[in-house]
Amino acid sequence: MTKAVGVGLLGFGTVGSGVVEIIQRHQNELQHKVGCPVEVKKILVRDVNKQRKVEVNRSILTEVASDVIYDPEVDIIVEVMGGIEDTKLQLIEALNQKKHVVTANKDLMALHGAELLKVAAENQCDLFYEASVAGGIPILKGLSDGLSADRITKMMGIVNGTTNYILTKMTQEGSSYEEVLSQAQELGFAESDPTADVEGLDAARKMAILATLGFSVKVQLDDVSVRGISSVSDADLHYSHQLGYTMKLIGLAQRDEDRIEVSVQPTLLPHHHPLSSVHNEYNAVYVYGEAVGETMFYGPGAGSLPTATAAMSDLVQVIRNMRLGVNGKTVQEPLHERVLKEDKEIESQYFIRLKVVDRAGTFSTITSLFAEYEVSFEKLLQLPIEGEEAAEVIIITHKTNKENYQLLINRLNELAVVHSLESSYRVEGGQ
Ligand SMILES: NC(=O)C1=CN([C@@H]2O[C@H](COP(=O)(O)OP(=O)(O)OC[C@H]3O[C@@H](n4cnc5c(N)ncnc54)[C@H](OP(=O)(O)O)[C@@H]3O)[C@@H](O)[C@H]2O)C=CC1
Ligand SMILES: N[C@@H](CC=O)C(=O)O
Ligand code: NA
């Protein structure tokens, strides 16, 4: 039999234990696909004495990274521990040792992906990162293989499992934000610091990776405009629903000619929109290509075995490349210059919720301001607030540009008839 390929893991938590479980349980299928046994040789953890979900021989656990990186029996490193700067240095060290790398680390790839890919290419090594975006969905392979000949113009999707889980449970079961967040943590969906999930940063990192690959443009993390779900209230969910919309944390990457926009924000979608029925930790990404038209990638976006499946598909690809002697050949420089759209080029509908003074003339003052910025109403709801001389006004606008919208929002806040601007969100999938 052909010599076994040796795998070293950095991390043995939610994703790492899934990787080991798949290697153990699917060894026959793996051997059939790659033509040799796949063996886990070493695993880096923080604490070798910790109780583990998946059983391995204790002797392969270590708390010293170099035990994995310099192990001559390790051909491929699977990095599933997280972290940025130290992890980057360790992966560079591993690549310089001619170890191929598979990683689930979007924090690292969004910030240092280009540099790491360069080091990998210089060492004729593979560096694959399918698990870093949308968990078990083969979205990166979908873009780089399936749609490789197309020109991608838009990607829109739900790319964070934790926030989708939270919004689903809040909307469908009326659960509290805190309660569902801790469930998502227990289920292993959330990041070690869940602020990255709920404040949209995790999704922004994934959108930067997607936009870089899909548009062949070097998109920086700072290019992504980000807003999370921590300020979404029950009232927002309630009124959105009443007006026919579902709230989702949406990542959007769009290009017109060579000008791009990348954002992550809570967004209202019509109930009938396919992304509205993506629930719990599931993710989905719409990809629009000039030639293919519209495709949608759907599946579990977080969790142990789904995410490990993505890392394993990269592992299989690395081993196939090893057998063909073609590792490190897939890296390409971006084709296009990165030019970001200006606010006046970004068009969208908006949901605006105001608390206003409940008396004659209020409405005409508000509508005049909207008219001044050429923003018209598509839907409107006005409800008196019991026990107060105030009313709640909820507006869905027609499409307007972001510059006008922001000017309007600033001025609305200053109107004497407006007590407060309660909330405002982008609306997609309508007109
Ligand atoms: N969970 C998910 O659904 C997904 C996670 N990811 C990404 O995968 C990576 C891993 O996530 P996840 O498995 O959830 O994380 P966990 O916290 O469950 O696991 C992390 C593992 O790495 C080990 N570890 C962490 N830091 C160090 C260190 N400095 N030195 C040694 N060992 C260390 C831990 O050791 P010990 O066990 O001893 O504590 C643990 O085994 C992250 O980059 C995450 O963003 C990507 C997609 C989905
Ligand atoms: N915390 C992430 C894990 C997968 O990337 C998420 O919730 O999507
Ligand atoms: Na994926």
Image (cartoon, helix red, strand yellow):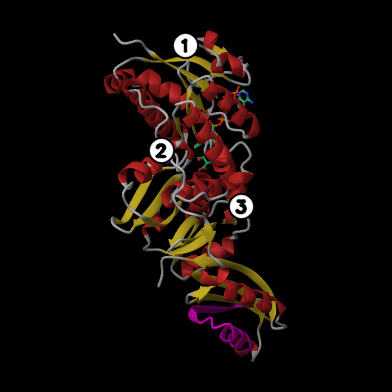
* Amino acid marked by disc 2: Gly
**65 on left or right of 212:** right
Q: Nearer the viewer, residue 422 or 196?
A: 196
Camera-near label (2 vs 1) is 1
The disc, 3 or 2, on the residue closer to the chain's N-terminal end is 2
- Which range is magenta? 365-385
Residue 332, by quadrant, is top left
Determine if the C-beta at disc 2 is less than 8 A from ligand 3: yes
The correct choice, above or below, for 212 with respect to 271 in the image is above
The disc, 2 or 1, on the residue closer to the chain's N-terminal end is 1
Regarding residue 165, the answer to whether it shows in the image is no
Quote the CA–CA distance across marks 2 and 1: 28 Å
At x 53%, y 76%, the residue is: 395
Quote the CA–CA distance across marks 3 and 2: 26 Å
Q: Residues within 10 Å of mark 2 (few under 14, many from 20)?
A: many
* Residue identified by numbered label 3: 222
Contact between labelled residues 1 and 2, with CB atoms less than 8 Å apart: no
Question: Which quarter of the rendering shows the C terminus?
Answer: bottom left
Checking the image for residue 73, the label placed there is 1
At x 53%, y 35%, the residue is: 105
Quote the CA–CA distance across marks 1 and 3: 40 Å
At x 40%, y 49%, the residue is: 284
Question: Which quarter of the rendering shows the N terminus?
Answer: top left
* Amino acid marked by disc 1: Glu
* Amino acid marked by disc 3: Asp
Q: Is residue 373 magenta?
A: yes
The disc, 1 or 3, on the residue closer to the chain's N-terminal end is 1
Contact between labelled residues 3 and 1, with CB atoms less than 8 Å apart: no
Disc 1 is placed on an element classified as: loop
Furthest residue in direction left, as rendered? 32
